[in-house]
């Protein structure tokens, strides 16, 4: 079992319930990970993802090894048949198989380069490990998705759910740097599994996400209209997908302000963090009692713990099945 995308969740409702059960007693399965090792490979920076995933593994009794691959590892070659007489020192074939010798689960964080759309969509790093590693893989954010974040978002919304059918709005907001589409992509995919919620995406014209991901999700180009009667506002910047990786709009009128939140149904404010204050969202909004960004960050632990727990149980069940078959063969 791997966890690399939202599609790996067979029943979001069930997973959320299971995560909340873990949250109530996070050390219940402390023995499950005994003598098991999680190897975390970071090709990019991390705060919440690194600490929450590491804590999740510790809660399960696992050993944890962390490597900042971008600064500590060899430069990898990913192309089959490559003549390695240039910059790369090691091929993904050996690297993935070697790490698999030390790990029971490998978790990987590798961002998009935002230069080559085709290359980013191919998920070179994640796909390379999935192909050549011999142990389960967990996505801690890749070029096109951040499924651990979106699982935590679903858990958080469940904790703050309304009695009526809630309206959830994903809003683009300005940012001085070009950011990937990973978080909004996974959030959209997660929301497409939420049958009991109304979902709207709002952004400037030209900032459409990959249509293969948004599918028939509702898009509203008028942010104020989108905010009307919303119960959850999820703010996030992403760079232009059509003019790939470019910043083609920096309009400060898309910043989430108290005035805009007043259009909502007393909505909860959400963001994956880190956030640029007074660019993405004003201090007044993020510091308000309706801001649940810290709860989101806290739930990252239980999202990761659920995923690791499922993988450990699945691996254990597979091992027992193999042992049973071996006995019968004798």
Image (tube, rainbow, N blue to C red):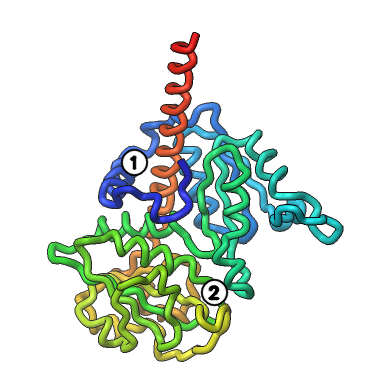
Q: Earlier in the sequence, mark 1 or mark 2?
A: 1
Q: Residues within 10 Å of mark 1 (few under 14, many from 20)?
A: some
Query: In this view, which residue lies farthest toward the right?
Result: 85
Percent x, y of residue 131: 59, 47
Q: Position of residue 317 (x, y in %)?
A: 41, 27
Residue drawn 42% across the image and 80% down it: 208
Q: Is residue 322 above or below residue 98?
A: above
Res 176 seen here? no
Would you name the residue on which mark 2 appears? 179
State if disc 2 and disc 1 touch (CB < 8 Å): no
Q: Residue 77 placed where, x, y %?
A: 73, 55
Location of residue 152 by image quarter: bottom left
Image depth: mark 1 or mark 2 in front: 2
Q: Which mark is residue 22?
A: 1
| Position above or below: 120 against 302 | below
- Look at the picture and state if 104 lies above or below 3: above
Is disc 1 placed on a helix, strand or loop?
helix
The secondary element bearing badge 2 is classed as loop
Q: Residue at x 34, y 87 (%)?
A: 221
* Distance of label 1 from label 2 (alpha carbons): 32 Å
Residue 44 screen position, x and y as percent = 62, 60
Q: Residues within 10 Å of mark 2 (few under 14, many from 20)?
A: many
Q: Is residue 70 left or right of residue 25?
A: right
């Amino acid at each position: 079992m791997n966890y690399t995308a939202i599609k790996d969740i067979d029943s979001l409702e069930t997973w959320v319930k299971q995560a909340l059960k873990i949250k109530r007693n996070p050390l219940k399965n402390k023995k499950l990970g005994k003598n098991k090792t999680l190897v975390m490979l970071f090709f990019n920076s991390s705060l919440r993802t690194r600490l929450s995933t590491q804590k999740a593994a510790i809660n399960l009794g696992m050993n944890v090894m962390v490597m900042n691959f971008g600064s500590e590892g060899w430069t990898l070659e990913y192309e089959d048949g490559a003549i390695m007489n240039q910059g790369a020192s090691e091929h993904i074939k050996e690297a993935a198989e070697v790490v698999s010798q030390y790990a029971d689960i490998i978790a990987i964080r590798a961002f998009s380069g935002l230069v080559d759309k085709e290359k980013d969509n191919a998920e070179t790093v994640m796909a390379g490990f999935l192909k050549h590693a011999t142990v389960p893989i967990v996505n801690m954010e890749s070029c096109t998705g951040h499924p651990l974040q979106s699982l935590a978002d679903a858990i958080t919304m469940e904790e703050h759910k309304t009695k009526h059918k809630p309206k959830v709005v994903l809003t683009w907001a300005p940012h001085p740097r070009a950011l990937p589409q990973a978080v909004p992509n996974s959030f959209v995919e997660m929301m497409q599994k939420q049958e009991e919620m109304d979902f709207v995406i709002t952004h400037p014209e030209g900032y459409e996400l990959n249509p293969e991901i948004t599918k028939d999700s509702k898009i509203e180009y008028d942010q104020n209209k989108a905010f009307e009667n919303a119960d959850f506002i999820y703010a996030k910047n992403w760079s232009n997908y059509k003019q790939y990786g470019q910043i083609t709009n920096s309009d400060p009128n898309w910043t989430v302000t108290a005035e805009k939140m007043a259009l909502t149904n007393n909505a909860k404010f959400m963001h994956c963090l880190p956030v640029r204050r007074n660019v993405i969202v004003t201090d007044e909004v993020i510091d308000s009692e309706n801001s649940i960004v810290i709860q989101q960050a806290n739930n990252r632990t239980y999202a990761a713990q659920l995923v690791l727990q499922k993988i450990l149980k699945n691996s254990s069940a597979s091992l027992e099945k193999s042992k049973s078959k071996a006995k019968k063969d004798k």
